[in-house]
Image (cartoon, rainbow, N blue to C red):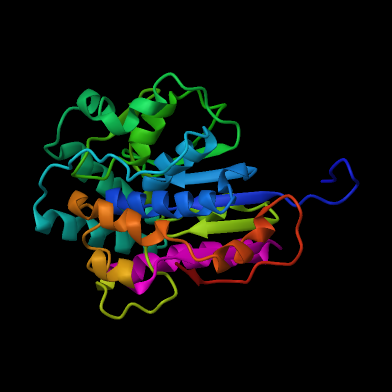
Amino acid sequence: MANDSGAVRLSRGLVLGAGGPVGRAWQVGLMDGFARQGINLGTADLIIGTSAGAVVGAQLALKQGFGAPPRIDAAPPVFSGTMVDLATAMARAAQSSEPELIRAEIGRMALNAQTISEEASVSRSIFAPYVGQAWPSQLQITGVNARTGQLRIWDASSGAPLERAIAASTAAPCIWPPITINGERYIDGGVRSMLNADLATGCDIVIAVSCFPLTAGDEAGPAFFKAMNAAPLAELDAVRGSGATVALIEPRSDFVVLTKHGTAMMDGNLVPEAYRLDRSQRSARQNRFAAFGIRISKPLKKYPVRF
């Protein structure tokens, strides 16, 4: 693609991954820090949002701005055994040759769980800024069909209300209810992958933001997280294999410790600190991502870039 000066303009994709309310706060702090340095990742040609990333992606695409910790709707208490069962099932799906069958099992768990009502969930304050908003043309949001376990991607052509698509993508099984869109019920897009980075195939430059450490070798983390990391890493390698330049932003060790190696991502009490950790950007980061602008001066590093 050439711009008015005749120079080739490389297409840019931004992938924002899952991470619960704490991961969302971390992403918001990250985007706010970038914005204060004049870097607007919302100018991407394609934004892929999954779960927490769906909320942040919509905020970026709609140019709603950042600058404060996100307001979080308190999640209802969930038995730890239920969450272990859920995470174990997700890890099994990540390693399975027939992952959709296991995701359908997770969907059944979600459909049978005792949660607040679907309409009460969609009416939560987190979704209020998106009610009645037109779909941004570059935004895609992921979900998983609770009945079939299949991936569902919503965009401006899908006919889904923006707030319902975001609610579906953030419908963590057994915590929030599945969300009905066009007669089907959907659960969190993170059930398919914590990144879904393969959906950015076709972009020349892809920046992926993971709320979980994918390459840092977190030996203290639970085994099921290690299993779930395989899919996002394979996706990133596939995107690179298509010819794209890929950079992965993943959290530093202080965020990993704060979230108890990913197991406390649903703890709303951690939101202010998670936001603060990555709001304080170092000036060197601006140089690392200067290539995300219209003019491409030099390629991004492969990955990782730990913030």
The vertical placement of 184 against 7, above or below, is above
Pick the residue in front: 74 or 233. 74
Q: Position of residue 209 (x, y in %)?
A: 48, 58
Residue occupying image coordinates x 36% and y 23%: 183
Q: Is residue 148 magenta?
A: no
Q: Is residue 256 above or below residue 61?
A: below
Residue 51 in the image: x percent, y percent? 37, 45
Where is residue 278 drawn, in percent x and y? Answer: 40, 60
Q: Residue furthest top?
A: 132
* Residue lying farthest to the right in this orientation: 6
Range of the magenta residues? 224-253
For residue 230, say whether it is visible.
yes
Please indicate, yes or no, whether residue 101 appears anywhere in the rendered image: no
Residue 132 is situated, as x and y percent measured from the top left of the image, at 43, 18
Reply yes or no: does residue 232 show up in magenta.
yes
Q: Residue at x 42, y 47 (%)?
A: 53
Which secondary structure type mostly characterizes the magenta part of the structure?
helix
In the picture, measured across the screen, residue 201 lies left or right of residue 123, that is right
Residue at the image point whose x is 49% and y is 63% from the top: 249
Which quarter shows the C terminus? bottom left
